[in-house]
Image: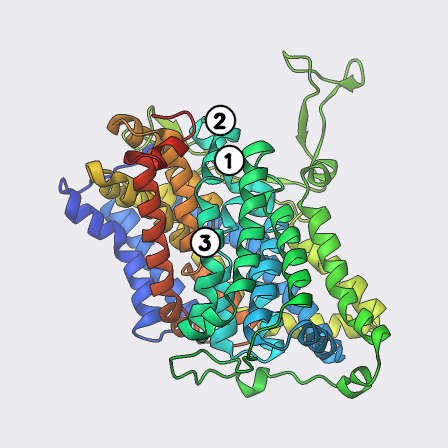
Amino acid sequence: MVWQQVYDPFGNPVLSTLMAATPVVVMLASLAFFHVKAHLAALLALASALLIAIFAFGMPANMAGSAALYGAANGLLPIGWIVLNIIFLHRLTTENGSFKVLQDSLARITDDRRLQLLLIAFCFGAFFEGAAGFGTPVAVTGAILIGLGFSPLAASGLALIANTAPVAFGALGTPIITLAKVTGLDEMELSMMVGRQLPFFSVLVPFWLIWAFAGWRKMLEIWPAILVAGVSFAVPQFLVSNYHGPMLVDVIAALISMACLTGFLKVWKPASVHTSAALSGRVDNSRIDAEHDEKPVATAVFANEAKPAVMRAWMPWIILTIFVFIWGTQSFKNNFDVRPVIDPQTSTAKLDPQGKPMFEGSPVFAPVVTFSTLHLQVVKVPPVVSAPKPEEAVYKFTWFTATGSGILLAAIVGGLLMGYSIPQLIRQYLRTLWVVRFSLITIAAMLALGFLTRYSGLDATMGLAFAATGIFYPMFGTLLGWLGVALTGSDTASNVLFGGLQRVTSEQLGISPILMAAANSSGGVMGKMVDAQSIVVASTATRWYGHEGEILRYVFFHSIVLAILVGGLVTLQAYVAPFSHMVVGGH
């Protein structure tokens, strides 16, 4: 049975849009105002989405259920798999005391909390975003910040704010590469355009981050260091994205920024040291729940050793960095996930019409599950797309090349080198699984909600409301990207959802489709800090379970204001010289 999406089931765009937005309102209100636990809020939002998709938008019930299951599967792998295994590694380093030594070694670079935040949340986090993405940077930096003594709200919220400017080029450029495929626009031109938008915010976000943490005056005290961190990231971000492509933008920019900031701190010190790890300008009573507040058991032994102990403390995280980078490369994935198609008659690889070898998925490392009731049975129709387009629903179970698997192997190798036995590792893993159980439920439910809104057309109904804004479309089109990430938790997914709509609408309005497709990705990065998936990752990494609503309330203002600023830049690029000269290919 083939079902075509309906974008205005009530014959009233306002009423249809309000109905489509109901699941989002249910989730946000449950978290922020009614203090409902995150997993229950996500399940409530999912239930409301199922009812609306089936009874209001006419989606067949079996298709709606399949869409939710498809989303849940994508939530557990790769997102939940990353969270589970990074928390496992963090517990191992905490239990044997090496994490305390790592904290002390970072403090020796600088004991100023503002500079620690720059180095870890912005620079180090950007590297993990570039190498892996999908929640890894927030999980890693949130865990490190909480270990350094930052309050849970500060560690969670600031890790989320920092993980913005690098997101469009995350996971080795996956959002841009996907955007090119979805829209049919040139990948290099999209990379160039995003690279002419985000560097402005790569300079702004470090200043914003320190202001959000310590206040305006304390931010000005270390402006030279902030400028070094931001500019040394923004310049390589622009150069690599415009002259090389999207894949290595964040990795190169983050490494250069870390090196420049560390080197600068060897020759420059702030006039006064900021030692408070709580948020400035607000009552920050956040704390880790006692039952989850693991205490290191061997701190004294490590703390009394010198450089060998520091090297052992950094060793698991160095191993993690190496594994994550390897697992993020396309060549590594291709070695396991695909295999040549063999001609049974000649026993040689089959060639396509261009004479290139043909490949198929590996049945061992990338088995495929086709959701047959959904696959090619749901059809997107104009004006969301230029021509009717069936939606695929094929789940590739890339269990080995998933980033979480690389993290798990890194944790096992690091754990063995730290002196854990195999039985001890198994016990720690089972404890970790129990600790993050509700987080995994939340992530699965959130992705189920995101996929259901995509396949039912609820997201497109909301998107069309933005598209009807005419001359103001550069602003609202950018906010559409923000909405897409807020709904799905992924800049890649937002580009899949709204990339086609951005191209169709911009062409109808006479605006550059390259500009608006790029704006979808650039605006989307600011939605990363408010999506429920990222908030759950942050609360789990900082062991501040059940406080997702407080984190959401803290970051929401920062998210929406930064998204509006991106929209302002895109508007200038659309209409006002000299900004309009930055548009790739012009109008």
Frontmost residue, 155 versus 255:
255
**Distance between the alpha carbons at the discs numbered 1 and 3:** 21 Å
Q: Please rate how many residues cluster around mark 2, counting C-alpha atoms within 10 Å: few if below 14, some from 14 to 19, many from 20.
A: some
Residue corresponding to mark 3: 489
Frontmost residue, 346 versus 263:
263
Q: Please rate how many residues cluster around mark 1, counting C-alpha atoms within 10 Å: few if below 14, some from 14 to 19, many from 20.
A: many
Relative to 302, residue 28 above or below: above
Q: Measured from the top left, where is residue 356 in percent x and y?
A: 69, 17
Mark 1 or mark 2, whichever is nearer to me: 1
Q: Measured from the top left, where is residue 425 in percent x and y?
A: 77, 71
Q: Earlier in the sequence, mark 1 or mark 2?
A: 2
Residue corresponding to mark 2: 186
CB-based contact (under 8 Å), mark 2 and mark 3: no
CB-based contact (under 8 Å), mark 1 and mark 2: no
Residue corresponding to mark 1: 191
Q: Secondary structure at mark 1?
A: helix
Kind of residue at badge 2: Asp
Q: What residue do we see at 48% from left, 47% from top?
A: 199
